[in-house]
Image (spheres, rainbow, N blue to C red):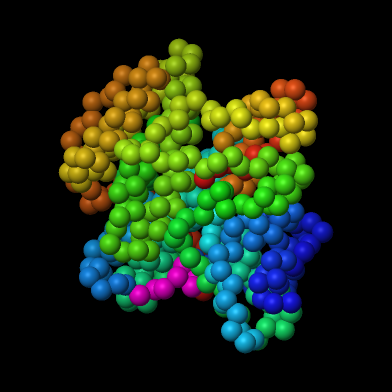
Amino acid sequence: MNAQAVVGTVTDPELPMVTLAELGIVREVRQDGDGVVVTITPTYSGCPAMESIRADIATALRRAGFGTVEVRTVLAPAWTTDWISESGRRKLAEAGIAPPGAAPRRGAGPIPLTLTPRSSAVHCPRCGAAETEAVAAFGATACRELRRCPACREPFEHMKEI
Amino acid sequence: MAFDDAYGALTDHDDDARWAYGTGFTDPLHGVPAEIPDGVDRAGLFARCLALGDDALIMSHRLQQWVTRAPELEDELALANIGLDLLGQARLLLTRAGEAEGAGRDEDDLAYRREPHEFRNVRLAEVADADFAHLVARLLVFATWRLALFDRLTADPDPVLAAIAAKGVKEITYHRDYAAQWVVRLGDGTELSHERMVAAMTAVAPLIDELFDGDAGLRAECDAVLAQVLTAATVPAPPIPAGSGRRDEHTAALTEILAEMQQLARAVPGGSW
């Protein structure tokens, strides 16, 4: 397997149903002989999984026989949920986590304040109901929020748009 | 690599991953070029990153103290997540401060091995919360100010600070919304919650002026946001006394915070756990 393919098998430590590549965390894989430089970007500033992610990528590449492995971090441009691939979105939904909608587009002027819970246009990943309610804007990890479905009465997680 | 469950990943000792908190973590800017570009004033960059890093570190610590004490489980999650975002910002900023200073200090040196008088955080970040209304009042002012400031810092001459700010803007937008929604809920709630929200805003007001360092544009933007929230919350805007200048004084609360935060790192120098 080439380095790109090896890195493509590494899954996220907190969302093991999707790969780091599907989440858009892997920005570049550069292979030069048996050396590889992988560039990744954090989802949130305080993401505690970054060191585990670095180690998982390095371990996968070494096991595949690559000699020198370097994992670099890039901060700009900042990660956005728009980088999550179609297959990543499908796998999240299959695991009961509603995938994010389009990230908010910034207009001119100051960043607008939101005094009411954000859009209700998140479909229920269990029964498919179109309208669901926000319970809390924060969840088990930085990237998720809690919602509930009035139709099937089940709570679920939604990956929030950033 | 794949694991059957999250616990499998935690107990895998095949790598250097650490999941517990301690000192000796890998540099959070690992692999980001550490050099300071030509034309960027090192002393100025050090001061900017240190102040913003200290604000985030101390505010994060105060938020962590609310975990297990919040009114609802959802708020435990929210406050822990906001604290974690700010801790992440603090790590990036203190690391960059150390690089700008060029004296070999890393994030642990700056967080754990400085005395209270060397901290540059605003007093707003360090004061203890009298109740939950006080916390959301403080968080609203803090997030409103930090969001407007970070939005401007996305154009900083240092590309690393600009990138940290651009990332932070997305996070703080959620922090501000959370605090604002609680201020409205309490202010426009029962008679008792209204009274306590009014008292909380009055208590926070003397800590507002020092945030702006005379920056009228920044002040106007923040005043407009606070007015929007307070109007929706039916909380009268408190008079804001003129401050004594930014970051030149601390309350006794900072000494208490640092005693708690630095204790283990000082007792076990270089320890990791």
Q: Range of the magenta residues?
A: B29-35
Q: Left or right: where does residue A81 sit relative to residue B216?
A: right
Against B244, is B195 above or below? above
Q: Quadrant of residue B241?
A: top left
Q: Position of residue B101 (x, y in %)?
A: 30, 71
Number of residue marks: 0
The C terminus of chain B lies in quadrant: bottom right
Q: Left or right: where does residue B88 sit relative to residue A86?
A: left
Against A17, is A32 above or below? below
Q: Position of residue B240 (x, y in %)?
A: 23, 30
Out of B121 and B249, give the one closest to the viewer: B121
Q: Is residue B33 magenta?
A: yes
Q: Residue at x 25, y 51 (%)?
A: B247
Q: Residue at x 45, y 58 (%)?
A: A77
Q: Position of residue B200 (x, y in %)?
A: 38, 27
Do we see residue B138 in this rendering? no
Q: Residue at x 67, y 50 (%)?
A: A86
Do we see residue B155 in this rendering? yes
Q: Main secondary structure of the magenta part?
A: loop
Out of B130 and A93, give the one closest to the viewer: A93
